[in-house]
Image: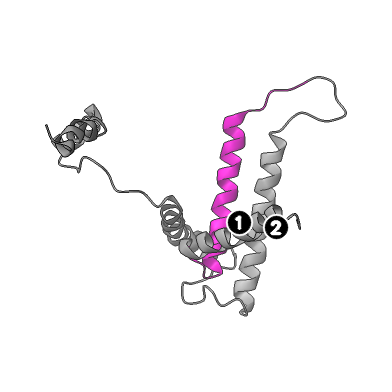
Amino acid sequence: MTESSSRVPAVKAFIPQQTTEDAARQRAGLPAELPPVNFLEMIFKAQEHLMAKYHHIEKTNGAAVITSDLQGNLDNRQVQARMHELYGFLVRELSEAMQELKNKPWKQTDRPTDYQAFVGEMGDCLHFFVEMCITAGMTADDLHRAYFREFQKNNQRIDSGTY
């Protein structure tokens, strides 16, 4: 047996066996391995869909509604008014999330947190944050890049001791 043929079984040992889920996906006509999902892009697309559905309701109720042609025009007074409005909604939702954290430093008894309610409020926060990003003309990719630029800067500051 040559050296190369003796390595083949070792390589095959690292190839995973087909899972039951893989087989079920293949029977359903789906690829065995699903492509990676860009969750941030999905969130932005879902928010754009919601915005299209409820903007007519907001307009009827007198809210500052921004059409897609104005998105990103941060010098526009209507866009600025909408950003201020969304900021207020975001702050309210953050306050609602914090209300779910019941323990106070001045009290001696611990109170349990309703985790699902807290997560729901944080989802509401994300809703308004993403709408602010879209109104400002940002894409999911813009936000992703901005986050990792800041992440890199903060990492360098921490590593260099200048934080």
Secondary structure, magenta segment, majority class: helix
- Secondary structure under badge 2? helix
Q: Is residue 3 left or right of residue 138?
A: left
**Front residue of this view, candidates 154 and 130:** 154
Residue found farthest to the bottom: 75
Q: Quadrant of the C terminus?
A: bottom right
* Residue 72 position within the rendered picture, expressed as x and y whole percent measured from the top left: 54, 74
Q: Is residue 110 left or right of residue 21?
A: right
Q: Nearer the viewer, mark 2 or mark 1?
A: 2
**Front residue of this view, candidates 123 and 20:** 20
**Residue visible at 48% across and 58% down in the picture:** 54
- Rendered view: 136 above or below 124: below
Q: Is residue 60 visible?
A: no
- Secondary structure under badge 1? helix
- Rendered view: 50 above or below 68: above
* Residue 61 position within the rendered picture, expressed as x and y whole percent measured from the top left: 57, 61
**Front residue of this view, candidates 44 and 17:** 17
Q: Earlier in the sequence, mark 2 or mark 1?
A: 1
Q: Is residue 32 visible?
A: yes
Q: Is residue 13 magenta?
A: no
What residue is shown with label 1?
151
What residue is shown with label 2?
157
**Residue visible at 29% across and 48% down in the picture:** 35
From which residue to which does the magenta span run?
Answer: 110-139
